[in-house]
């Protein structure tokens, strides 16, 4: 049985609650299905603000499924727990073809980033069809390869504002793809851990020189998987700064005065 996001049990504490890794803030959450052009059913979840203006939409692309990546990879899970309530941002998470999680398993099989082009297109089409505004791709590790390879070409390019990359390895994505991003003129924010296993800040700045609008941000002390609340929080702040209209330098609150739930590991 797939996980039902409506199963979270919210309670009203007597005062503000510190936001921790397992803290779930209020949102309208629903299980969704995406359909690819080659007929696969992909499973996912959409988290929307419970009330107020919907300011931006994140279309998340997860790390490598053959190495444990899926829609619940921790930064994306925390984004879905927090950003609808704290920033008015919708978070769409889904499992690429052949990938499983507590939500369920998407149809198909891992295709080394080739067939996954249709997964990216299906996710973007879903967001467009739902009328979700100010759409941004957010890729992490393998997900950055998908964003780079397919985000600056049609039918995706005209439907997204730009992309945010977390720990890009630049294994599958080549200079050809980087030049496509350069030609698109769309924003590209690149968060690179100081201690990354694959590509560190100095190397990333060199590789991304071909994209004039790319902003490479080195994060001291961080590793490829952004383990630790300090680093996950930094990522979420950087995402919000980039996608909210007009930009913002205000850090997300670290406590919440309202109903909260606790996610089980």
Image (cartoon, rainbow, N blue to C red):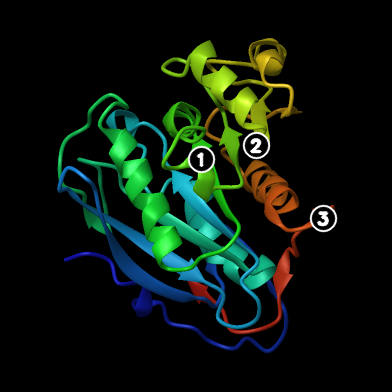
How many residues crowd around disc 2 within 10 Å: few (fewer than 14), some, or many (20 or more)? many
Comes first in the chain, label 3 or label 2: 2
* Foreground of the two, 223 or 88: 88
The image shows residue 236, relative to residue 23, as above or below, that is: above
Q: Residue at x 65, y 84 (%)?
A: 258
Mark 3 to mark 1: distance in Å? 24 Å
Q: Name the residue under label 2.
A: 186
Q: State the image quarter where residue 193 is shown.
A: top right
- Under circle 3, the secondary element is loop
Kindly tell me whether residue 265 is visible in this rendering: no
From mark 1 to mark 2, how far is it between C-alphas?
Answer: 9 Å
Residue neighbourhood size for the residue with mark 3, other residues' Cα within 10 Å, grouped as few (<14), some (14–19), many (≥20) = few
Residue under label 3: 248
Picture quadrant where residue 45 is located:
bottom left
Locate the N terminus by quadrant: bottom left
The residue lying at 24 percent from left, 48 percent from top is 36
The residue beneath circle 1 is: 157
The residue carrying pointer 1 sits among few (fewer than 14), some (14 to 19) or many (20 or more) residues within 10 Å by Cα, namely some
Dot 1 lies on which element?
Answer: helix
Residue 243 to residue 215: above or below:
below
């Amino acid at each position: 049985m797939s996980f039902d996001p409506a199963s979270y049990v919210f309670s009203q504490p007597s005062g503000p609650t510190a936001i921790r890794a397992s803290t779930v803030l209020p949102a309208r959450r629903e299980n969704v299905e995406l359909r690819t052009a080659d007929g696969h059913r992909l499973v996912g979840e959409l988290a929307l603000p419970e009330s107020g203006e919907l300011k931006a939409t994140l279309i998340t692309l997860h790390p490598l499924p053959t190495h444990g990546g899926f829609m619940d990879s921790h930064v994306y899970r925390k984004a879905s727990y927090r950003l609808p309530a704290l920033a008015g941002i919708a978070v769409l998470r889904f499992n690429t073809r052949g990938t499983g999680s507590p939500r369920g398993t998407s149809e198909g099989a891992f295709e080394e980033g080739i067939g996954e082009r249709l997964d990216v297109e299906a996710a973007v089409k879903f967001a467009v069809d739902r009328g979700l505004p100010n759409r941004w791709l957010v890729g992490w590790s393998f997900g950055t390869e998908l964003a780079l390879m397919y985000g600056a070409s049609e039918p995706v390019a005209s439907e997204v504002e730009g992309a945010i990359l977390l720990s890009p390895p630049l294994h599958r994505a080549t200079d050809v793809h980087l030049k496509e991003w350069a030609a698109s003129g769309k924003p590209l924010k690149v968060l690179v851990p100081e201690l990354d296993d694959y590509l560190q800040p100095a190397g990333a700045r060199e590789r991304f020189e071909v994209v004039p609008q790319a902003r490479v941000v080195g994060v001291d002390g961080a590793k490829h998987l952004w383990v630790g609340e300090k680093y996950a929080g930094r990522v979420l702040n950087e995402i919000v700064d980039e996608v909210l209209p007009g930009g913002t330098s205000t850090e997300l609150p670290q406590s919440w005065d309202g109903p909260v739930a606790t996610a089980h590991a």
